[in-house]
Amino acid sequence: MLSLLITMTQWQGLVLTSFALLGLVLLSRTSLNIYRSLIVVLLWMGLFYGPATGWVWPENSPIWFGHWSVAGLVQAGDMLWRIALVFGLTRLYTAVTMPLEQGLGIAYFFNPLIRITPKAADFALLLTLTLRFIPLIVEETTLIWKVRVLKCELPQSWFKRSRELMHLIVPLILLTLRRAEELAENLMLRGYGSGNYRTLILHEQTPWDRLGVLIVGIWAILLLIWR
């Protein structure tokens, strides 16, 4: 919800979100190394959006007859600012929240919709399983790659290394299908049926949880006001 509002708010909302993100990073005490890849992506996007948006030229004229536009460069900077905030909040959320807790949180909010349609339960289960098994798939990919490296010397060129990565697709698909089959058998043995999925509650709500919900609600309202 906040990510959607960030794409629509004005500069006041972007400033508020920037300070909020900085405060959350300091409170969470996460390592700044997790944002290194984000900075690299933003630099490459800046190299693309800057020339693409900042350079303008008259209609029916060659591109080299154009000139740099201050409004275009400001628009590119505004776009990168919004993208950086969305990616930064997402990266921080995934860094401090376990995949299982993410799935349970999503399923908790989908739980009231189960009374309207049973498809909501199926969708909640799908999201929970997806978030739960993504780390396992990444771990299996790392193990397969290490076994591949032990069997043969790692090529130096990027082209040959890409070919080696392509060879990992088939065993990874087979392992994923085997896990999916085992999961389906476990669901059948436990009597799972469409529309009867129920969320799990790991702990009761605390005052800190209610305070967090209140802060996020006020944050979202301010972003709506500054649209």
Image: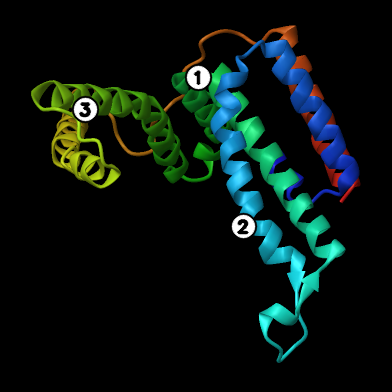
Q: Is residue 210 depicted above or below 66 in this figure?
A: above
Residue at the spot 82% in from the left edge and 48% down from the top edge = 9
In what element is the residue under mark 3?
A: helix
Q: Nearer the viewer, residue 102 or 48?
A: 48
Image coordinates for residue 20, horizontal then vertical, percent: 80, 26
In what element is the residue under mark 2?
A: helix
Which residue is disc 1 drawn over?
101
Residue at the spot 43% in from the left edge and 45% down from the top edge = 119
Proximity of marks 2 and 1: CB atoms separated by less than 8 Å: no
Which residue is disc 2 drawn over?
48
Q: How many callouts does the rendering have? A: 3
Q: In which quarter of the image is the N terminus?
A: top right
Image coordinates for residue 204, horizontal then vertical, percent: 61, 8
Q: Nearer the viewer, mark 3 or mark 1?
A: 3
Q: Is residue 92 left or right of residue 225?
A: left
Q: Which of 118 and 216 is in front in this view?
A: 216
Give the amino acid type for the residue marked by disc 2 in the picture: Phe
In what element is the residue under mark 1?
A: helix
Q: Is residue 5 depicted above or below 75 in this figure?
A: above
Which residue is disc 3 drawn over?
145
Give the amino acid type for the residue marked by disc 3 in the picture: Trp
Residue 1 seen from this side: no
Q: How crowded is mark 3: few (under 14 residues within 10 Å), some or many (20 or more)?
A: some
Give the amino acid type for the residue marked by disc 1 in the picture: Glu
Q: How crowded is mark 2: few (under 14 residues within 10 Å), some or many (20 or more)?
A: few
- Residue most toward the bottom? 60
Q: Is residue 92 left or right of residue 199?
A: right
Residue at the spot 38% in from the left edge and 25% down from the top edge = 132
The mark nearer the N terminus, 2 or 3, is 2
Gap in angstroms between the C-alphas marked 2 and 1:
36 Å
